[in-house]
Amino acid sequence: MSDGIKRVTGLLIIEAVNSNPNGNPDQESDPRVRDNGQGEISPVSFKRKLRDLMELTQGPVFQAVTQKLPDVPTGYQFGILESRGRDRQAISKKMGDIKDYVEEKYLQSEFVKEYWDARLFGNTFLEEGGAKGYIKTGIVQFGMGLSISPIIIQRHTNTNKAGVQEGKNQGMAPLAYRVVQHGVYVMPFFINPSLANKSGCKPCDVELLKRLIPYAYDHTRSAIRPDVRLRHAWWMAHKDALGSCPDYLLIDALTPKRKGNDPMTPSTSWADYEIPTVLPSELSQKVDCMDLMAQ
Protein backbone atom coordinates (compact mmCIF):
# COMPACT_ATOMS: atom_id res chain seq x y z
CA MET A 1 0.00 0.00 0.00
CA SER A 2 1.37 3.40 -0.98
CA ASP A 3 2.66 5.24 2.08
CA GLY A 4 0.17 3.46 4.34
CA ILE A 5 -2.92 4.38 2.28
CA LYS A 6 -5.27 1.49 1.57
CA ARG A 7 -7.35 0.99 -1.52
CA VAL A 8 -10.97 1.74 -0.61
CA THR A 9 -14.34 1.19 -2.28
CA GLY A 10 -17.01 3.48 -0.86
CA LEU A 11 -20.75 3.83 -1.28
CA LEU A 12 -23.00 6.65 -0.06
CA ILE A 13 -26.74 5.99 0.33
CA ILE A 14 -28.48 9.38 0.28
CA GLU A 15 -32.18 10.04 0.88
CA ALA A 16 -33.75 13.32 -0.27
CA VAL A 17 -37.08 14.32 1.30
CA ASN A 18 -38.80 17.42 -0.07
CA SER A 19 -35.38 18.85 -0.90
CA ASN A 20 -33.24 19.70 -3.90
CA PRO A 21 -30.04 17.71 -3.40
CA ASN A 22 -28.33 19.20 -6.47
CA GLY A 23 -29.75 21.94 -8.68
CA ASN A 24 -29.03 22.13 -12.41
CA PRO A 25 -28.06 25.68 -13.49
CA ASP A 26 -28.90 24.77 -17.10
CA GLN A 27 -32.52 24.13 -16.07
CA GLU A 28 -33.23 27.04 -13.74
CA SER A 29 -31.89 25.08 -10.73
CA ASP A 30 -34.31 22.20 -11.17
CA PRO A 31 -33.12 19.06 -9.36
CA ARG A 32 -30.83 17.20 -11.73
CA VAL A 33 -32.63 14.44 -13.59
CA ARG A 34 -31.98 12.10 -16.52
CA ASP A 35 -34.28 11.50 -19.46
CA ASN A 36 -35.55 8.29 -17.85
CA GLY A 37 -36.53 10.17 -14.69
CA GLN A 38 -33.64 9.10 -12.47
CA GLY A 39 -32.31 11.87 -10.28
CA GLU A 40 -28.63 12.83 -10.18
CA ILE A 41 -26.22 14.25 -7.61
CA SER A 42 -22.96 15.34 -9.19
CA PRO A 43 -19.56 14.46 -7.66
CA VAL A 44 -18.71 18.18 -7.64
CA SER A 45 -21.80 18.88 -5.53
CA PHE A 46 -20.80 16.43 -2.80
CA LYS A 47 -17.14 17.49 -2.74
CA ARG A 48 -18.27 21.12 -2.45
CA LYS A 49 -19.97 20.31 0.83
CA LEU A 50 -16.81 18.74 2.20
CA ARG A 51 -14.79 21.76 1.12
CA ASP A 52 -17.30 24.18 2.65
CA LEU A 53 -17.07 22.43 6.01
CA MET A 54 -13.27 22.58 5.92
CA GLU A 55 -13.37 26.30 5.14
CA LEU A 56 -15.37 26.90 8.34
CA THR A 57 -12.25 26.63 10.48
CA GLN A 58 -14.03 27.98 13.57
CA GLY A 59 -16.98 25.64 13.14
CA PRO A 60 -17.63 22.54 15.26
CA VAL A 61 -17.09 20.08 12.40
CA PHE A 62 -13.63 21.39 11.49
CA GLN A 63 -12.65 21.50 15.14
CA ALA A 64 -13.80 17.91 15.71
CA VAL A 65 -12.42 16.21 12.59
CA THR A 66 -8.97 17.79 12.77
CA GLN A 67 -8.32 16.80 16.38
CA LYS A 68 -5.57 14.25 16.95
CA LEU A 69 -5.07 13.37 13.30
CA PRO A 70 -2.37 10.70 13.07
CA ASP A 71 1.06 11.33 11.56
CA VAL A 72 0.55 14.81 10.11
CA PRO A 73 3.79 15.70 8.25
CA THR A 74 5.61 18.84 9.30
CA GLY A 75 4.09 21.90 7.65
CA TYR A 76 0.99 20.14 6.37
CA GLN A 77 -2.22 22.18 6.59
CA PHE A 78 -5.80 21.50 5.58
CA GLY A 79 -6.65 24.52 3.45
CA ILE A 80 -9.02 24.54 0.47
CA LEU A 81 -7.73 25.32 -3.01
CA GLU A 82 -11.19 25.39 -4.62
CA SER A 83 -12.36 28.33 -2.53
CA ARG A 84 -14.23 31.42 -3.61
CA GLY A 85 -12.19 34.60 -4.01
CA ARG A 86 -8.85 32.83 -4.15
CA ASP A 87 -5.72 34.75 -5.14
CA ARG A 88 -4.41 33.00 -8.25
CA GLN A 89 -1.05 34.78 -8.26
CA ALA A 90 -0.35 33.98 -4.62
CA ILE A 91 -1.24 30.33 -5.17
CA SER A 92 0.96 30.13 -8.27
CA LYS A 93 3.93 31.32 -6.23
CA LYS A 94 3.36 28.52 -3.75
CA MET A 95 3.49 26.00 -6.58
CA GLY A 96 6.96 27.12 -7.63
CA ASP A 97 8.44 27.94 -11.03
CA ILE A 98 6.22 26.27 -13.64
CA LYS A 99 8.91 26.71 -16.29
CA ASP A 100 11.26 24.45 -14.36
CA TYR A 101 8.91 21.73 -13.19
CA VAL A 102 10.46 19.01 -11.05
CA GLU A 103 8.32 16.37 -9.36
CA GLU A 104 10.31 16.43 -6.12
CA LYS A 105 10.16 20.20 -6.02
CA TYR A 106 6.40 20.15 -6.46
CA LEU A 107 5.89 17.63 -3.65
CA GLN A 108 7.96 19.81 -1.32
CA SER A 109 6.19 23.02 -2.31
CA GLU A 110 4.08 25.15 0.00
CA PHE A 111 1.18 24.45 -2.35
CA VAL A 112 1.13 20.73 -1.59
CA LYS A 113 1.57 21.34 2.12
CA GLU A 114 -1.28 23.84 2.34
CA TYR A 115 -4.19 22.50 0.27
CA TRP A 116 -5.94 19.38 1.54
CA ASP A 117 -8.43 19.16 -1.33
CA ALA A 118 -5.65 19.38 -3.95
CA ARG A 119 -3.77 16.51 -2.32
CA LEU A 120 -6.92 14.41 -2.10
CA PHE A 121 -9.08 15.25 -5.12
CA GLY A 122 -6.43 16.53 -7.53
CA ASN A 123 -5.66 19.87 -9.09
CA THR A 124 -6.15 21.48 -12.49
CA PHE A 125 -5.40 24.96 -11.21
CA LEU A 126 -2.82 25.87 -13.86
CA GLU A 127 -4.33 23.96 -16.76
CA GLU A 128 -5.20 27.15 -18.61
CA GLY A 129 -1.55 28.21 -18.46
CA GLY A 130 -0.36 25.02 -20.11
CA ALA A 131 1.61 23.75 -17.12
CA LYS A 132 0.63 20.14 -17.68
CA GLY A 133 3.10 18.90 -15.09
CA TYR A 134 1.00 20.55 -12.42
CA ILE A 135 -2.27 18.93 -13.44
CA LYS A 136 -2.75 16.21 -10.86
CA THR A 137 -5.32 13.45 -10.61
CA GLY A 138 -6.29 12.91 -7.00
CA ILE A 139 -6.41 9.59 -5.20
CA VAL A 140 -10.12 10.02 -4.36
CA GLN A 141 -12.78 9.96 -7.06
CA PHE A 142 -16.51 10.31 -6.39
CA GLY A 143 -18.89 8.91 -8.99
CA MET A 144 -22.24 10.26 -10.13
CA GLY A 145 -25.01 9.78 -7.59
CA LEU A 146 -28.09 8.21 -9.20
CA SER A 147 -31.53 7.64 -7.72
CA ILE A 148 -32.64 4.02 -7.70
CA SER A 149 -36.12 4.92 -8.95
CA PRO A 150 -37.32 7.94 -10.93
CA ILE A 151 -38.05 11.08 -8.95
CA ILE A 152 -40.99 13.48 -8.92
CA ILE A 153 -40.10 17.18 -8.92
CA GLN A 154 -42.48 19.53 -7.13
CA ARG A 155 -42.43 23.21 -8.16
CA HIS A 156 -44.00 26.09 -6.21
CA THR A 157 -43.88 29.86 -6.31
CA ASN A 158 -41.84 31.60 -3.64
CA THR A 159 -43.43 34.69 -2.10
CA ASN A 160 -41.91 37.58 -0.18
CA LYS A 161 -44.20 39.62 2.05
CA ALA A 162 -41.85 42.60 2.06
CA GLY A 163 -41.78 42.72 -1.72
CA VAL A 164 -38.83 42.32 -4.03
CA GLN A 165 -39.55 45.45 -6.06
CA GLU A 166 -40.05 49.01 -4.84
CA GLY A 167 -43.70 49.98 -4.63
CA LYS A 168 -44.90 46.38 -4.53
CA ASN A 169 -46.57 44.96 -1.44
CA GLN A 170 -45.67 41.41 -2.26
CA GLY A 171 -43.00 39.83 -4.42
CA MET A 172 -43.23 36.48 -6.13
CA ALA A 173 -40.70 34.17 -7.74
CA PRO A 174 -42.81 31.87 -9.93
CA LEU A 175 -41.87 28.18 -9.65
CA ALA A 176 -38.65 29.05 -7.82
CA TYR A 177 -39.12 26.43 -5.11
CA ARG A 178 -38.16 23.17 -6.83
CA VAL A 179 -37.70 20.01 -4.76
CA VAL A 180 -37.60 16.24 -5.07
CA GLN A 181 -40.58 14.74 -3.25
CA HIS A 182 -38.62 11.63 -2.36
CA GLY A 183 -35.58 9.85 -3.72
CA VAL A 184 -32.87 7.43 -2.64
CA TYR A 185 -29.55 8.00 -4.36
CA VAL A 186 -26.47 5.80 -4.58
CA MET A 187 -23.05 7.49 -4.98
CA PRO A 188 -19.88 5.37 -5.24
CA PHE A 189 -16.41 6.64 -4.44
CA PHE A 190 -12.95 5.15 -4.78
CA ILE A 191 -9.54 5.64 -3.16
CA ASN A 192 -6.58 4.68 -5.35
CA PRO A 193 -3.29 4.66 -3.41
CA SER A 194 -1.24 4.31 -6.61
CA LEU A 195 -1.42 8.08 -7.14
CA ALA A 196 -0.61 9.18 -3.59
CA ASN A 197 3.07 9.74 -4.30
CA LYS A 198 2.16 12.01 -7.22
CA SER A 199 -0.27 14.28 -5.36
CA GLY A 200 1.49 14.42 -1.99
CA CYS A 201 -1.49 12.81 -0.25
CA LYS A 202 -0.80 11.27 3.17
CA PRO A 203 -2.76 8.87 5.41
CA CYS A 204 -3.85 11.81 7.58
CA ASP A 205 -5.61 13.34 4.56
CA VAL A 206 -7.59 10.15 3.99
CA GLU A 207 -8.40 9.86 7.69
CA LEU A 208 -9.74 13.42 7.61
CA LEU A 209 -12.01 12.57 4.66
CA LYS A 210 -13.24 9.52 6.55
CA ARG A 211 -14.15 11.63 9.57
CA LEU A 212 -15.73 14.41 7.48
CA ILE A 213 -18.10 12.44 5.25
CA PRO A 214 -20.81 11.78 7.89
CA TYR A 215 -21.35 15.55 8.38
CA ALA A 216 -21.59 16.46 4.69
CA TYR A 217 -25.35 17.10 4.66
CA ASP A 218 -26.32 17.62 8.30
CA HIS A 219 -24.02 20.63 8.62
CA THR A 220 -24.61 22.20 5.19
CA ARG A 221 -28.41 22.44 5.17
CA SER A 222 -30.04 25.24 3.21
CA ALA A 223 -33.55 26.57 2.53
CA ILE A 224 -33.85 24.49 -0.64
CA ARG A 225 -32.03 21.49 0.89
CA PRO A 226 -33.44 21.15 4.41
CA ASP A 227 -33.78 17.36 4.57
CA VAL A 228 -31.13 15.37 2.75
CA ARG A 229 -30.15 12.34 4.81
CA LEU A 230 -26.90 10.43 4.48
CA ARG A 231 -28.35 7.08 5.52
CA HIS A 232 -25.24 4.95 5.01
CA ALA A 233 -21.63 5.74 4.17
CA TRP A 234 -19.96 2.42 3.43
CA TRP A 235 -16.17 2.39 3.67
CA MET A 236 -14.64 -0.88 2.41
CA ALA A 237 -10.87 -1.10 2.77
CA HIS A 238 -9.26 -3.78 0.61
CA LYS A 239 -6.81 -6.22 2.20
CA ASP A 240 -4.69 -6.27 -0.95
CA ALA A 241 -2.97 -3.22 -2.42
CA LEU A 242 -4.14 -4.21 -5.90
CA GLY A 243 -7.70 -4.81 -4.71
CA SER A 244 -8.97 -7.90 -2.95
CA CYS A 245 -12.19 -8.12 -5.01
CA PRO A 246 -13.89 -6.20 -7.85
CA ASP A 247 -15.43 -2.86 -6.86
CA TYR A 248 -18.72 -3.58 -8.61
CA LEU A 249 -19.39 -6.67 -6.47
CA LEU A 250 -19.13 -4.58 -3.31
CA ILE A 251 -21.27 -1.79 -4.74
CA ASP A 252 -23.96 -4.16 -6.02
CA ALA A 253 -24.10 -5.98 -2.68
CA LEU A 254 -24.83 -2.81 -0.69
CA THR A 255 -27.10 -1.01 -3.16
CA PRO A 256 -30.72 -0.79 -1.93
CA LYS A 257 -33.37 -2.56 -4.00
CA ARG A 258 -36.79 -1.14 -4.81
CA LYS A 259 -39.64 -3.20 -3.42
CA GLY A 260 -42.52 -4.21 -5.67
CA ASN A 261 -42.78 -5.33 -9.26
CA ASP A 262 -42.01 -1.97 -10.86
CA PRO A 263 -38.68 -0.44 -9.79
CA MET A 264 -39.37 2.54 -12.06
CA THR A 265 -42.24 3.76 -9.89
CA PRO A 266 -41.17 6.81 -7.83
CA SER A 267 -40.84 6.08 -4.13
CA THR A 268 -42.59 7.91 -1.32
CA SER A 269 -40.58 6.76 1.70
CA TRP A 270 -37.50 4.89 2.92
CA ALA A 271 -39.75 1.89 3.57
CA ASP A 272 -40.14 1.40 -0.19
CA TYR A 273 -36.64 -0.10 -0.34
CA GLU A 274 -34.87 -3.22 0.84
CA ILE A 275 -31.71 -1.92 2.52
CA PRO A 276 -28.63 -4.17 2.86
CA THR A 277 -26.92 -3.79 6.23
CA VAL A 278 -24.01 -6.21 5.83
CA LEU A 279 -21.87 -7.65 3.06
CA PRO A 280 -22.35 -11.31 2.09
CA SER A 281 -19.83 -13.55 3.86
CA GLU A 282 -17.88 -14.28 0.68
CA LEU A 283 -17.19 -10.56 0.29
CA SER A 284 -16.85 -9.54 3.94
CA GLN A 285 -13.78 -11.78 4.21
CA LYS A 286 -12.02 -9.80 1.50
CA VAL A 287 -12.43 -6.25 2.85
CA ASP A 288 -12.70 -4.42 6.15
CA CYS A 289 -16.19 -2.94 5.88
CA MET A 290 -17.68 -0.25 8.10
CA ASP A 291 -20.60 2.16 7.95
CA LEU A 292 -19.27 5.61 8.82
CA MET A 293 -22.77 6.65 9.90
CA ALA A 294 -22.69 4.03 12.64
CA GLN A 295 -19.39 5.15 14.18
Image (tube, rainbow, N blue to C red):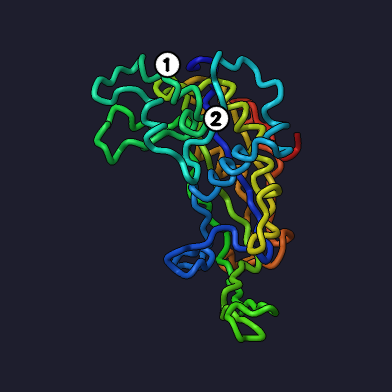
Residue 137 in view, yes or no: no
Q: In this view, does 67 lie above or below 188?
A: above
Indicate the position of residue 115 as horizontal and vertical percent values. Answer: 50, 30
Identity of the residue drawn at 62% across and 43% down? 254
155 and 245: which is toward the camera = 155
The reply to whether the C-beta atoms of the residues labelled 2 and 1 are less than 8 Å apart is: no
**Residue furthest toward the front?**
167
Indicate the position of residue 166 as horizontal and vertical percent values. Answer: 59, 81
**Label 2 is placed on what type of residue?**
Val
Q: In this view, does 185 lie above or below 38?
A: above
**Label 1 is placed on what type of residue?**
Gln
The quarter holding residue 238 reads: top right
Give the tally of numbered discs: 2
Question: How would you rate the neighbour count of disc 1 (Cα within 10 Å): few for under 14, some for 14-19, many for 20 or more?
Answer: some
Under tag 2, what secondary structure?
strand
98 and 7: which is toward the camera = 98
Question: Can you tell which mark lies on residue 108?
Answer: 1
Q: Would you name the residue on which mark 2 appears? A: 8
Indicate the position of residue 271 as horizontal and vertical percent values. Answer: 74, 60
Residue 235 in view, yes or no: yes
The quarter holding residue 77 reads: top right
User: Which circle, 2 or 1, is nearer the viewer?
Assistant: 1
Q: Is residue 68 left or right of residue 200?
A: right
